[in-house]
Amino acid sequence: MEDSQVDSMPIEESVEDSAVPPTSAPKTKKGAAAPAAREPGKSSFPVSRVQKIMKADKELPMVAREATFLISVATEEFIKRLAEESSIVAARENRVTIQYRDLATIVRRVEKFMFLDEIIPFQPPPAPAKRKAKAQNEDSQLGRTTTMLDAFVARAQSPEGPDEDIIMNEDGTMSANPS
């Protein structure tokens, strides 16, 4: 869809403006999110928050209220498009929930989102677990597992670290005193 088409699209009517009473609204599944309808002339984002973010940029002097509104609406549209693209990736993997890897995939593959590469980097999947050590493998074959008590006893039998004593000073600080 071209940007000029988006700009010429009519704004959806809000629930209050429609002639259908609210009791006859279609039922949604329990836990499913209802599509958000934006009132004409209002944004989903708080105006004060958008202004605060814009004021953080020292290069911008004063910004008109209309410009703040347009930036807010543009942000909504951007998030909507990013979510739609990510939803398509999740649907290909038979999932409903969008995960980080879906966003990272979109950033890598869709040209209009490539500028987000530094913000949403692609993280390769974790490497498969390495094989257990031979000694651990033998223990598991015998049915033995390491318990907390075994770890405590092994730690008590092992030699202590460096030969240092920890001294508590009168002012509450601690210091190490080599022996």
Image (spheres, rainbow, N blue to C red):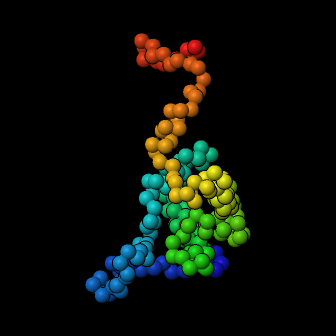
Q: Residue at x 67, y 57 (%)?
A: 130
Q: Could you tell me which residue is drawn at 60 percent across and 23 percent down?
A: 162
- In the picture, the quarter occupied by the C terminus is top right
**Quadrant in the picture for residue 6:** bottom right
Q: At 61% across and 53% down in the image, what residue appears?
A: 136
Note whether 154 is above or below 68 in the view shown. above
Viewport quadrant of the N terminus: bottom right
Q: Tell whether 21 sits left or right of 67.
A: left
Q: Position of residue 114 (x, y in %)?
A: 70, 64
Query: Which residue occupies the foreground of this view, 104 or 115?
Result: 104
Q: Residue at x 46, y 53 (%)?
A: 49
Residue 69 in view (yes/no): yes
Considering depth in this image, is 153 or 30 the residue closer to the camera? Answer: 153
Considering every residue shown, the one lying at the far front of the view is 142
Residue 41 in which image quadrant: bottom left
Q: Which of 106 and 162 is in front in this view?
A: 162
Does residue 113 appear anywhere in the picture?
A: no
> In x, y percent, where is residue 60?
60, 48
Total tally of numbered discs in the picture: 0
- Tell me where residue 92 appears, x and y as whole percent: 61, 79
Q: Which residue is more in the foreground, 26 or 74?
A: 26
